[in-house]
Image: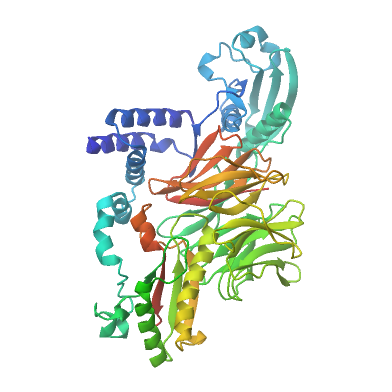
Amino acid sequence: MNFLKKILILGLMLAFAPLSQAELTIDITESSDSGTPVAVVPFATSGAPVDVSSVINADLARSGYFKMLAEQYMRSRPSSASAVQFPEWQALNQNYLVVGQVGGGTGGQYSVQFQLLDVLKSSQLLGYQMNSSAADLRRTAHQIADMIFEKLTGKKGAFSGRIAYVTNNKQQSQLQVADADGFNPQTIASSQEPLMSPSWSPDKSKMAYVSFERKTAAIYVQILATGQRKRVAEFPGINGAPAWSPDGNKLALTLSKDGSPDIYTLNLGSGSLTKLTKSYSIDTEPVWSPDGNNIVFTSDRGGKPQLYMVSSNGGGEKRITFSGDYNARASFSPDGKSIAMVHGNGGDYRIGVMDVGSKSINVLTTGPADESPSFAPNGTMVLYATKKGGTAYLSAVSLDGKMQQKLAFSNGGVREPAWAP
Amino acid sequence: MKLNKILWILLAAVFALSGCSEDEATDGLNAGQNAASGINDASTSGLNGASTLSGMAGAGYTGVTGNNSFLGPEFTDPNNPLSRSTIYFMLDSSEVQPDFIQVINAHAKYLVAHPNQKLTLEGHADERGSPEYNIALGDQRAKAVAGMMKAQGVTDGQLTLISYGEEKPAVFGSDEGSYERNRRAELSYQR
């Protein structure tokens, strides 16, 4: 039976393999039935290289806010508001409707028109025409999804954002940057030695990361557009966990040159180093509060790893997590009100989100090997790394835990995600 | 997207029929992916077989690696503590366990007798928990071994310390046996 199962799976994989276009593929693994009903009608087009409306539909579906109407239930396919029969969509219990068309195509130039309609009020909420090119059509589709998301939820969309992550196979480690849906992956660094801990500069133009390429740990800052980079820290011992200050002028980092791992800040302009913590225990994984006033870090000074906070000028150290025997790797929500973390109990590691005010932790994932949480720039989802069946992959979860999606890399493991701010 | 969903539904149906656990199903999927992309990776397929791991544990766990054999026969004599070059640690701990004190002492004695000989101490962690925290844990483990050696007269100049955290596992696997063998400090003499 086992053998037959494997043959059958192999057959399925082979049959579907040629359809995979991105190196990272997204699958929704858990979805909510409670979202607002929205129908995205397939856009009218004559041979555009990107199926714009299905990119929009997939983005909105992944957000966890909407319940998308499957194409098979649509009785008509209007491509503009004037062709919409509103009672038809009311009968399908839809609240909102997206229609549009992709025109042009000569010289690779396209024009995308779309309208967002309120089905109950039979009125238009948004209507735009956007110029695009063959190479930019996916980006245009993500931007449209962002506009629709913001109009319907009042929150900024995060679909046109980017993510960084590290892929590993036996031969090498690669630091890649891709669209938030895994498309357009670009390798920005690769090494036969480990690469770790990518951190975006606040203006998204640079990446700080750790590389062991010289058989020693070092932190690099790389300009994404040019690939130029500078080694900014290579002290004896650990050079790890770089994190940009919100003003982009400093990196917080972990060094162990004086003995135990401690938190430092490095002024990128002057090169001056300031030591913030001096415990004899492990202090690592610094992250700045969005206002730049504080740094939250992981320390085992109390015996087990817990989150602590220190002023970004040093001083005022205090513990901020108290439930669970392992709380590590903080990631602030953009509004500074929540902190995502690795929340472990008895060897089971999940992603928890703590309300900074009340200190209560809401556990979003089921474990047992979840790590490296990173908030979406609009604060609605957390991207993290996990592992199952020997394969490391990324997963994103909505803050209510109801929506889960998996981003798998076709050729090895993928870890250490960082959602661009 | 849609086809992916169909695929998942089909796979789910296959597993439901064969009555497998989810973990087995995922293993099967990995094997399929590797085969489909033409990768013939012997260690990856070994990874999925639990029997391979338990078979290795008996011999491997004492820390005999033999990569220091260029130094002389005492480094390959299984009755000599110098033949052991891996120090294992408990979960989330950098405390040297009593079993390994004799091994560290033997290496310290050798280094004191050979002051020009240099040793690299690599600290490692198992894959659980946070990668950078595991770098710190590996650093503490290498330092714990270095501290014992220096107390016996080994000089700073003889030792190079580096932590790889969970980035360079000795064995690939997500089970207790693999975790135990990945929480380690490796002693390798420089040629």
* Front residue (pair A35, A216): A35
Residue in the foreground of this view, choosing between A229 and B18: B18
In the image, B114: left or right of A202? left
Please determine whether, in this image, residue A305 is positioned above or below residue A110.
Answer: below
How are the colours assigned in the image?
Answer: rainbow
**Is B37 above or below relative to A49?**
below
Q: Is residue B8 visible?
A: yes
- Residue A417 coordinates in the image, percent (x, y): 56, 50
Q: Quadrant of the C terminus of chain B?
A: bottom left
Query: Can residue B170 be spotted in the picture?
Result: no
A115 relative to A296, above or below: above
In the rendered image, residue A131, in percent from the top left (x then y), is placed at: 70, 33
Q: How many marks?
A: 0
Q: Residue at x 27, y 35 (%)?
A: A5
The one nearer the camera, A262 or A146, is A262
Horizontal and vertical percent position of residue B95? 46, 70
Residue at left 55%, top 45%?
A351
Instruction: Please state the horizontal and vertical placement of residue A198, each as a whole percent of the image.
Output: 59, 56
Left or right, residue A163 beside residue B103: right
| A202 lies left or right of A52 | right
Quarter-of-image position of residue B58: bottom left
Direction from residue B74 to residue A273 in the image, left or right? right
